[in-house]
Amino acid sequence: MKLGSRTTKQKLVILDILQKTNCHPTADWIYQEARQILPDISLGTVYRNLNLLKSLGKIQELNYGSGQSRYDGNPNNHYHFVCEKCKKVVDLDLPVVADLDEQIGKNYGYKVSSHRLEFYGLCDTCQKEEPTT
Amino acid sequence: MKLGSRTTKQKLVILDILQKTNCHPTADWIYQEARQILPDISLGTVYRNLNLLKSLGKIQELNYGSGQSRYDGNPNNHYHFVCEKCKKVVDLDLPVVADLDEQIGKNYGYKVSSHRLEFYGLCDTCQKEEPTT
DNA sequence: ATAGGTGCAAATGTTTTGCTGTCAA
DNA sequence: TTGACAGCAAAACATTTGCACCTAT
């Protein structure tokens, strides 16, 4: 697998962390995980490699309202549910409507290359806790 | 129209700017516009009022990859096209699939309150300029 | 050998906040 | 009158960058 001009251990560790988790982590979470394997890795390196892996199409950057970006080790388009209370991001197992892009392109004269669909609300856990608030 | 506990001129000017434009501006753009009407308004006030208006459901905050949030004076759900080159954000005149929320909720056990759909690509202007790049 | 990558720290850019004074109700 | 809001500036926060050293090729 080609990972840019040099394959460094930092790059490999970051990609591996991202591919093994399903929690759509922030850069800082990835940094904390990576330090357990490479104690001297720096946050700057994490950001540099996340940007690199993104431009290579190996990962995706997601971002919702507040603050940090989140990263997704699955490079293929898929949809997400975001819990507005606990901020959890979950993959949805829905068919991706690929020809939507083409349709929009035709109707509006744009060249559409991708789309993003996200649902917001309360996850099962947070629904139960909600009345207490 | 109720705008929180006090209706200040700053609040009114910000809401008015947002409702009269269709360019989905950043906080700073709104600040620059507002200064032409209220020269002493501060950027902090702009942010405070944008957050207030958002929590009152009068406006929406949108955010894509890089840097600043953008604001939308239309509080009703609608879909957007984002040009990846010139960063322009355009409203799409598509029917909003409201029962999507309910369906997802049923299938996954979440309480879905809203969804967001965005298309990315090149707008008509940028498509023409593209070959030169 | 050497260019691309790393660690560190400083810089950048956006948004929030503390404080004091002001004004809408 | 009074508490919510304004202006100002500093702080907070996420992310990027400059630089000197290191290392994969």
Image (tube, coloured by chain):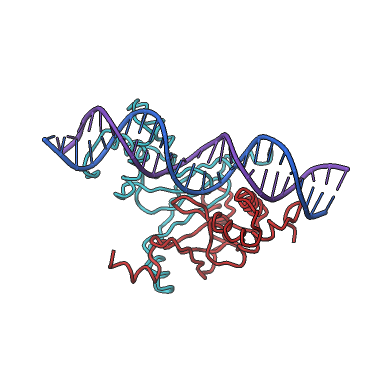
Chain colours: A cyan, B red, C blue, D purple
Q: Position of residue B89 (x, y in %)?
A: 48, 63
Residue at 53% x, 42% y: name it: A87
Is B17 on the left-hand or right-hand side of A76? right
For the C terminus of chain A, the quadrant is: top right
Locate residue B9, reporting x and y percent.
71, 58
Please say if B38 is above or below A91: below
Residue located at (53% from left, 56% from top): B26
* Residue occupying image coordinates x 37% and y 26%: A36
On the question of residue B49 being in view, the answer is yes
Residue placed most toward the observer, B16 or A132: B16
Q: Is residue B93 left or right of residue B12?
A: left
In the rendered view of the protein, which quadrant contains the N terminus of chain A? top left
Judge by depth and name the residue closer to the eye, B55 or C21: C21
Pinpoint residue A30: horizontal percent, then vertical percent.
Answer: 40, 35
Q: Quadrant of residue B57?
A: bottom right
Nearer to me, B133 or D25: B133
Asked if residue B103 shows in the view, the reply is: no
Is residue B13 rendered to the left or right of residue B68? right
Q: Is residue D11 above or below residue B85?
A: above
Residue B79: percent from left, percent from top: 51, 63
Q: In this figure, what is the number of numbered marks?
A: 0
- Quarter of the figure with residue A47: top left
